[in-house]
Image (cartoon, coloured by chain):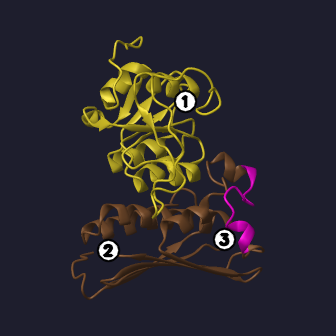
Amino acid sequence: MNDSAGIQARSTMTLADICKILNAEVICGEDKLDEQVTTACGCDLMSDVLAFTLPGSILLTGLTNQQVVRTAEMLDLKAVIIVRNKRPDESMVELACSKGLPILLSPYPLYECCGMLFAAGLKGCNGSVHAKDESSQKIEPAKPGEMTCGAPGLGD
Amino acid sequence: MEVSNRAEGLKETYDVAGRDFSSAGAASSRIKRILQQIGVDQGIIRRIAVSSYEAEMNLVIHASNGGRITLDISPDAVTILVEDDGPGITDIKKAMQPGYSTASDEIREMGFGAGMGLPNMQSCADELEISSEPGVGTTLKMVFMNR
């Protein structure tokens, strides 16, 4: 399966692949574009990100403050992608640069960005990831690139 | 600061300023760095960092006079003690429910107040004790076993 950017659907991709798919501009962390990414999360609520995002994921968000960088730092996130052509404020960029956190800007809205990456094979973060019992709170994950209609369990 | 002798333990306290959103997270960042320096397991570090950051944001958001976070490392466990003389929590049981929050719209616009703070800390920590008195303050103790 190929998407419009011509990237083969797969479960691991680099930040450079993600830039290409999302037509993104790199604000900082250009030296880390060859990092491999396996999961992503799209969210504007940092508390939910802290609760439900797998370490090493990328975060897609419309928020542009320093707390996004702090959240990424605590979770060892690989990059933050700011959607809808928003420009992050200077203090956010400064903090991200000091932490070596790549910041990417995409012109597309959150839903479209997530959809494009999902279709290209990038998985989501399913369930609670910090819980001591990792088997808890798991739901059947949707399969990237193979969604037919609606949420899993609703269409069949 | 050198943090090298794990066997002897380490204790540090950080002041957290209320309503200062530009430095919110600095204490947790420091805690994370110390734990990395002494070689604590990555998964445990992440649970501590997430919990400490949630607690730090709570101090910044709710306690106008701020508060203190104490990191206490012993060979067996890492303890995070969070104290403030803020407004206190009227109903702790409610506050532990996922989705319950008393944060203002202003806070929500910043990406917090999702009502996941305390539930998140509880799922991360091996032990969590919370005591609070309205009008007096809140004390939160989280223990993470080092295994």
- The three-letter amino acid code for the residue at tag 2 is Arg
Outermost residue to the left: B4
Label 3 chain ID: B
- The answer to which of A124 and B74 lies nearer the viewer is A124
Same subunit, tags 1 and 2: no
Image height of A106 relative to A69, above or below:
above
Q: Which residue is mark 1?
A: A86
Label 2 chain ID: B
Q: Which residue is mark 3?
A: B63
- Gap between marks 2 and 3, in whole Å? 33 Å
Same subunit, tags 3 and 1: no
Quadrant location of residue B91? bottom right
Q: Which chain is yellow?
A: A
- The three-letter amino acid code for the residue at tag 1 is Lys
On screen, residue B106 versus residue B117, left or right, reads right
Residue in the image at 74% along x and 67% along y: B94
Q: Which residue is mark 2?
A: B147
Residue in the image at 35% along x and 61% along y: B43
On screen, residue B141 versus residue B65, left or right, reads left
Label 1 chain ID: A
Q: Is residue A57 magenta?
A: no
The secondary structure type at the circle numbered 2 is: loop
Can residue B27 be spotted in the picture?
A: yes
Instruction: Give the residues drawn in magenta, as a range.
Output: B92-105
- Give the class, few, some or many, for how many residues have Cα within 10 Å of label 3's Cα (few <14, many ≥20): many
Image quarter where the N terminus of chain B lies is bottom left
- The three-letter amino acid code for the residue at tag 3 is Ala
Residue in the image at 32% along x and 74% along y: B147
- Give the class, few, some or many, for how many residues have Cα within 10 Å of label 2's Cα (few <14, many ≥20): few
